[in-house]
Image: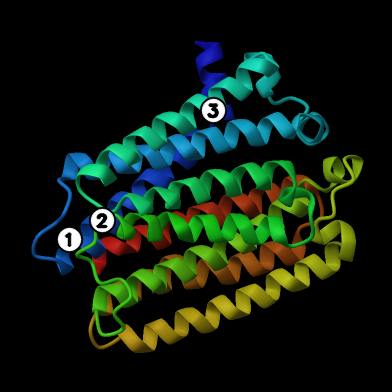
């Protein structure tokens, strides 16, 4: 039982649930209401989403594999992936999980959709691998990659439904899709910088070039403030746009996203130690969840 709990920690099980929930909400509240005839059945969509979860799981595993030295410093009490798996089996599991995900996608794209869409999952696999081996230790590009992949979670969902006009500017649900994509990108970028500040001790030991290490913690905080300002402007803009058509959505976002982000600003300003930034990171994750849950009101 202890080993099973450790495995759930390593694969970031709550994050996997979050990914699955994001795609399910996107499918049921953004895609289905705007199309008359879905290409896939609900079960087929669930399998597609499961392939995304498998890719994310493989990504977390390989990330921990390359982060053993960093985690030993930043999280000495945490069970590392080496305590559960042998180093060789880590690579094997990474390959197996990605292969299963690709087999699921290939099967359905051959029968129902265009095969070239398999490239979407291949891009995700490649980006996660390059992130773990290289990008994570580079200035800005690592943060940017994870933010893009988070937004990509929504885009992947709609790409597998050809009848959804996600590039049509006159399609209301397409506008909502891009609104949530931008929200996911910005909020993830903020959280990634917060996590870099939290993990600065281990990152410096491994010669990483993250924002707080290259430009300092004060500058990193200033960048977070700038991103928060952009987020505030973005939320106010969508509030004005949707105010007359969906007041419950705007009230929900105002109470559970907009106002809490002001509190996050204060928490970041007061944060001094790794545990403080860890708390901020957790709070931002909850705000992200609430933002995604607002889809039920669209």
SS for callout 1: helix
Could you tell me residue 278's position as x and y percent?
68, 47
Name the outermost residue toward the top. Answer: 1
Name the quadrant containing residue 81.
top right
Nearer to us of marks 1 and 3 is 3
Q: Earlier in the sequence, mark 1 or mark 3?
A: 1
| Residue 79 can be seen in this image | no
- Binning the other alpha carbons within 10 Å of mark 1 as few (below 14), some (14 to 19) or many (20 upward) gives some
Could you tell me residue 105's position as x and y percent?
34, 41
CA gap between label 2 and label 1 equals: 6 Å
Image quadrant where one finds the C terminus: bottom left
Could you tell me residue 225's position as x and y percent?
69, 74
Is 273 placed left or right of 100 in the picture? right
Marks 2 and 1 close (CB-CB < 8 Å): yes
Marks 1 and 3 close (CB-CB < 8 Å): no
Could you tell me residue 44's position as x and y percent?
21, 41
Residue at horizontal 17%, vertical 45%?
A: 42
Residue at horizontal 29%, vertical 79%?
A: 168
Q: Which residue is mark 2?
A: 27
SS for callout 3: helix
Q: Which residue is mark 3?
A: 95
Is 228 placed left or right of 175 in the picture? right
- Binning the other alpha carbons within 10 Å of mark 2 as few (below 14), some (14 to 19) or many (20 upward) gives many
| Residue 207 can be seen in this image | yes
Name the quadrant containing residue 90.
top right
CA gap between label 1 and label 3 equals: 33 Å
Name the outermost residue toward the left. Answer: 36
Q: Which residue is mark 1?
A: 32
């Amino acid at each position: 039982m202890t080993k099973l709990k450790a495995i759930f920690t390593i694969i970031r099980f709550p994050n996997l649930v979050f990914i699955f929930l994001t795609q399910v909400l996107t499918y049921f509240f953004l895609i289905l209401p705007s199309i008359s005839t879905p290409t896939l059945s609900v079960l087929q969509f669930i399998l597609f989403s499961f392939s995304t979860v498998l890719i994310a799981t493989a990504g977390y595993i390989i990330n921990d594999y390359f982060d053993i030295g960093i985690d030993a410093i930043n999280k000495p009490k945490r069970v590392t992936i080496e305590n559960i798996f042998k180093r060789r089996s880590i690579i094997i599991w990474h390959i197996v999980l990605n292969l299963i995900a690709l087999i699921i996608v290939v099967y359905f794209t051959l029968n129902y959709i265009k095969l070239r869409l398999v490239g979407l999952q291949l891009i995700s696999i490649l980006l996660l691998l390059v992130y773990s081996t290289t990008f994570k230790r580079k200035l800005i590009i690592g943060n940017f990659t994870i933010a893009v992949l988070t937004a990509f979670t929504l885009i992947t969902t709609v790409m597998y439904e050809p009848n959804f006009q996600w590039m049509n500017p006159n399609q209301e649900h397409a506008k909502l899709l891009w609104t949530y994509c931008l929200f996911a990108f910005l909020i993830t970028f903020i959280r990634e910088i917060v996590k870099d500040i939290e993990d600065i001790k281990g990152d410096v030991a491994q010669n990483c070039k993250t924002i707080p290490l290259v430009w300092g913690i004060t500058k990193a905080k200033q960048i977070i403030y700038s991103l928060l300002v952009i987020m505030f402007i973005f939320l106010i803009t969508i509030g004005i746009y949707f105010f007359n058509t969906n007041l419950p959505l705007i009230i929900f976002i105002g109470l559970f996203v907009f106002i809490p982000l002001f509190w996050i600003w204060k928490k970041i300003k007061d944060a001094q130690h790794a545990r403080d930034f860890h708390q901020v990171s957790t709070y931002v994750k909850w705000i992200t969840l609430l933002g995604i849950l607002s889809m039920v009101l669209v």
